[in-house]
Image (cartoon, grey):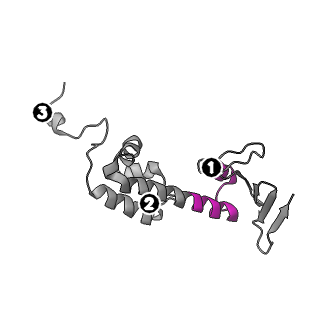
Amino acid sequence: MQTAQSLTEPNPVGPPSKWDASIITKARHYLANYQDYGKNIPTVARLSQVLNISRDRIYKWAQQKDKKELKYILSELKCIQEAELLENGLTGDYNPTITKLLLTKHGYTDNPNSNQGVSGITVNVNRSGVVLKSGGQTLEIDSTPGVTLEHTTE
């Protein structure tokens, strides 16, 4: 049986979904300071927690014309993710298997027989470095300090 007090408490099922102008301010702050949250890359999941809004709601709002800035924030978040994954994957700071998996969400693939993504670029990431392939060209980047880049054309 619910008491009058329990009816006035916040809904335990989920956070409110009302749009508020402070959402953009909070989202921008998160993007600029995501490392302050103890995280290596910004994620929509963490943004969802910071805003106290479901990921589904964030994506729905981002599609609405009057909330275009949220769409731009999500795009910027993905750009930061990609850059962090590439840079830290190359230095070996990130687990190569997880890096490779997460880069697939940005259009990268390591399957040479597949042309996933618009660019047709394939990426192989492992502890020794990265191999980028596009068409008949290959660029190998070794993560060993002092090793130079090797570029070949097939």
Q: The residue tagged with tag 2: helix, strand or loop?
A: helix
On the rendered structure, is 128 left or right of 48?
right
Upstream in sequence: badge 1 or badge 2: 2
Disc 3 marks which residue? 4
Q: Is residue 50 above or below residue 33?
A: above
Q: Residue at x 40, y 60 (%)?
A: 30
Mark 3 in CB contact with mark 2 (< 8 angstroms)? no
Disc 1 marks which residue? 107
Which quadrant of the view contains residue 151? bottom right
Which numbered disc covers residue 74? none
Picture coordinates of residue 76, whole percent (x, y):
48, 59
Magenta stretch in the rendered image:
82-102
Q: Residue at x 33, y 52 (%)?
A: 67
Picture coordinates of residue 1, whole percent (x, y):
19, 24
Q: The residue tagged with tag 1: helix, strand or loop?
A: loop
Disc 2 marks which residue? 37
**Which residue in the rendered view is the most extreme toward the right?**
154
